[in-house]
Amino acid sequence: MATLNFLLKGTSTLKHIYAKLYYRDSTGNKYNYYKNTGEKATSDDWKQITTKKRVSLSAENKKLKSILENLEEKVLKNLNTDLSKNVIIDKDWLQFQIDLFNKRVTKEKKITDLLTDNIQEYIRTAPIRPNGKGGVGLSKDRINQYKNLINLLSEYQQQNKKKYRVKDVNSTFAMNLLTYLDNKAYSPSYQQKILSNIKTVCNNARRNGIDVSLQLEDIKISDVKNEFINYLTEEEINNIDNLILTNEALNNARKWILLGAYIGQRGNDLVNLTEKNIIAKNGRKYFNLQQEKTGKPIHIPFNSKIEKLIKEGFPYHLNINGENGLNKRFKEIGILANIDEVVKGKKMCKKSKRWVYGEYPKHEILRTHDLRRSFATNLYGKIPSVVIMAVTGHSTEKMLLRYIGKNSIDMATQLAEYYDKQELLSQNKSKMTVLKNASNQ
């Protein structure tokens, strides 16, 4: 809800007309901003203009009333447009709208050195920016990261009662921001991601001729290991597979869950599959798709379990989020399948709309992303890593190992198990040779 009202200010006979913008954001926070419209009126004229009774207005007052009505219409229209783009709405924004209405400025607003303005510029130019796929145009998820960054910095600036400029991003800024994020209980990995995105924006501002801090390069981004790596074990997947469900919606969700655990794709790539993605080569069926995030073409062979699922009927489309989305159904099915091991993880708080980290029964924190990790984790060590990477879309083995939470100890254990197997094979071979020689005597 937003309104634009007008009021008189001043002590002289001819007073200034101020615009008062009031609006609430999506979280319910209230904002009031005042700016001089540049118009003036006497108290008597203003009383006539604003009265609800039918009065005869002079030509000048009719013109003034029309100007203010048009200004109100333009500001509220632009407000709705800019809120949908995550533009920061403040007194400077209101001043720009008034200047725009009065034709003091044009829409081609010059980029300032404000940090939030430069984030907005980065978002504006997202369609022509190089991406990680070797093409042009940032992904929707990447753009949303920067939109969320504007919201976060807006809150941070309001708390500190300061607007940060690109040049303010130095070592002290980084430490203070990390402290703020830590107090807000953001995860260490998310804190570093925020800092990384801010550095990206600052470097882009530098290329646009805006001064940056000499300490910008001293801000190091830490490679934080994901402490909460959850996945479905093979036993838990079998428990879900063995469920007998009479509810059609739950049974449909169960199919998507099992399919996700068998083919190792991200949530959007998974639920967007249809029978049109199935191809046949050399007598075997495959899923053929192009990953949304990486742009990589992927072929995934059917196994007997996938064959069984598809034979029962291809699952109908299901949104990932929402009241009846797959994430919610996943949790319901997790309860039915007794997936209740207490694990570390994060759960969305409905009130604060924030992730809360802690220990929970596994079914409470299950999400579609855990299916891709389940695929990679359960197959790791059983087939070559390069084969897993070809399906999941990971570019390097280092990325894959980090994704499934494997470290140097895990690698050493795997090597030790390989040595044990080789030793066992060698002993068996020696026994077979001795037996063979004995039979020849």
Image (cartoon, helix red, strand yellow):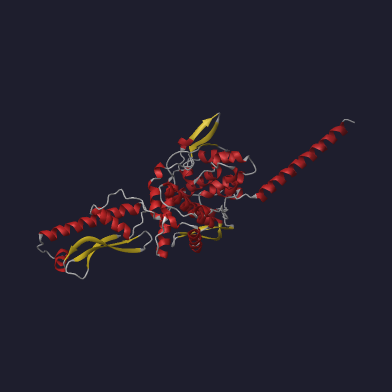
State which quadrant residue 73 falls in: bottom left
The residue sitting at 17% across, 66% down in the picture is 14
Q: Is residue 290 visible?
A: yes
The residue sitting at 44% across, 62% down in the picture is 352
Residue sitting nearer the eye, 113 or 179: 113
Q: Is residue 366 visible?
A: no
**Residue 248: percent from the left, percent from the top?**
46, 48
State which quadrant residue 317 falls in: top left
Above or below, 78 relative to 396: below
Most extreme residue toward the top is 282
- In the drawing, does residue 380 fall left or right of residue 353? right
Quarter of the image with the C terminus in it: top right
Most extreme residue toward the right is 441
**Residue 82: percent from the left, percent from the top?**
33, 53
Most extreme residue toward the bottom is 11
- In the drawing, does residue 424 fall left or right of residue 176? right
Q: How many marks?
A: 0
Residue sitting nearer the eye, 179 or 373: 179
